[in-house]
Amino acid sequence: MNFEPTEEQVAIRELAASFAASEMAPHAAKWDAEHIFPRDVIVKTAELGFGGLYVREDVGGSNLSRLEAAIIFEELAKACPSTAAFISIHNMAAWMIDRYGSEEQRQRFLPDMTAMKKISSYCLTEPGSGSDAAALRTKAVRDGNHYVLNGSKAFISGAGANDLYLTMVRTGDDSPNGISCIMIADGTPGLSFGANERKLGWHSQPTAQVNFDDCRVPVENLIGGEGNGFRIAMSGLDGGRLNIGACSIGGAQACIEHAMDYMKTRKAFGKAIADFQALQFRLADMQTELEAARILLYAAAQKVNDKHPLATRFAAMAKRKATDTGFDVVNSALQMFGGYGYLQDYPVERYLRDLRVHQILEGTNEIMRLIISRDMLRQ
């Protein structure tokens, strides 16, 4: 058990932090205010190896561990949680192809994905199935050398802007074993998109419905064989939960730092508010809770990387703890700013809006509690 990062992990953190500070932080407020999708900046991350973080090297991946990926997303989220989370979704899709795709599919899709020449969405949630993902209704019926898809996916990051859509569809019965995974390219006839959703946060990435109307997709795009889609989806979510937890921790850490800077300059009752013991105690509690969440997340990342029997439980615990704590810390930081924290002139309200959704996506935190408790009771 070693709580100190390796030299390589320190270098990885510094690399991600430098990129976030120079390429993301100066523009994040504008992206948020004007709903700008910074594709050019996202593509630049591929030059650092961030387009295929845990994809094998023969197709351009970086082959990093889950812990190293979490460190990267933590640093990127200090600048812009919305954009960091978007990059994590693309990485989840790339990993699914690397892990479950055939060698031909790996060579066909992944070189462009790891270079971010093609960016992928991940399509699981539907208008009628969120937490109950196994109830998805989008159908894929085999017709010769194609599947014909009909249905819709909801809340899809990058919908209408991305190049690829890794999609969970129903090819069989109504059980989880009837679900399969298929890759759909932008421009495929029958593929269309709804209007961009009007969201509380995550303004730097487009989110919309993805629609399939007799959408014909080649059979060769089926990933992992028929009936394996639900297993693929759930295995991908373990990593996704780590990443979104890391984004919460990074965003919250940034807000602690903003709050400390403000406390040193803001004066009340004749002295800097940093001198008030009540605020010092609150600051101490914020950092303590965040460090506890960070250590749990790193431990979960190691278990997922090692395929430990408790990996799914720990990923759920880490996601629940990190996203709840992250939001609470940001909310406390906003309170320290008083009325100014509510203004868009200061960055904390943007982090608050961006981090709120982390408690919902990749499985709601209520579902995380179900996963944890059911796994405990099975032991």
Image (spheres, helix red, strand yellow):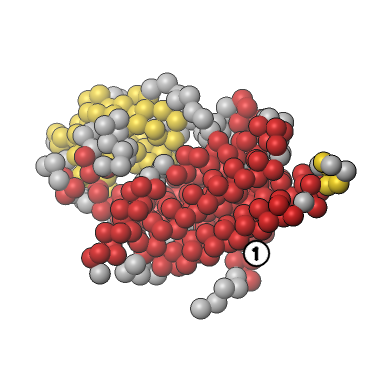
Q: Is residue 4 left or right of residue 317?
A: right
The amino acid marked with disc number 1 is Ala
Q: Is residue 195 left or right of residue 214?
A: right
For the residue pair 307 and 298, the one nearer the viewer reads as 298
Where does label 1 land, which residue?
A: 11
The C terminus is located in which quarter?
Answer: bottom left
For the residue pair 243 and 148, the one nearer the viewer reads as 243
For the residue pair 172 and 342, the one nearer the viewer reads as 342
Q: Is residue 29 left or right of residue 315?
A: right
Where residue 87 appears, x then y in whole percent? Answer: 51, 45
Residue plotted at (37% across, 24% down): 193
Residue 183 position (above or below residue 152): below
Where residue 106 appears, x then y in whole percent? Answer: 36, 52
Q: Is residue 335 left or right of residue 46?
A: right
Where residue 354 appears, x then y in whole percent? Answer: 54, 38
Residue plotted at (71% across, 46% down): 259
Number of marks drawn: 1
The answer to whether residue 147 of the structure is visible from this angle is: no
Residue 34 position (above or below residue 301): above
Q: Residue farthest to the left?
A: 173
Where residue 61 appears, x then y in whole percent? Answer: 48, 56
Residue 310 position (above or below residue 40): below
For the residue pair 44 and 88, the one nearer the viewer reads as 88
Q: Residue farthest to the right?
A: 270
The answer to whether residue 7 of the structure is visible from this angle is: yes
Residue plotted at (60% across, 61% down): 288
Q: Secondary structure at mark 1?
A: helix
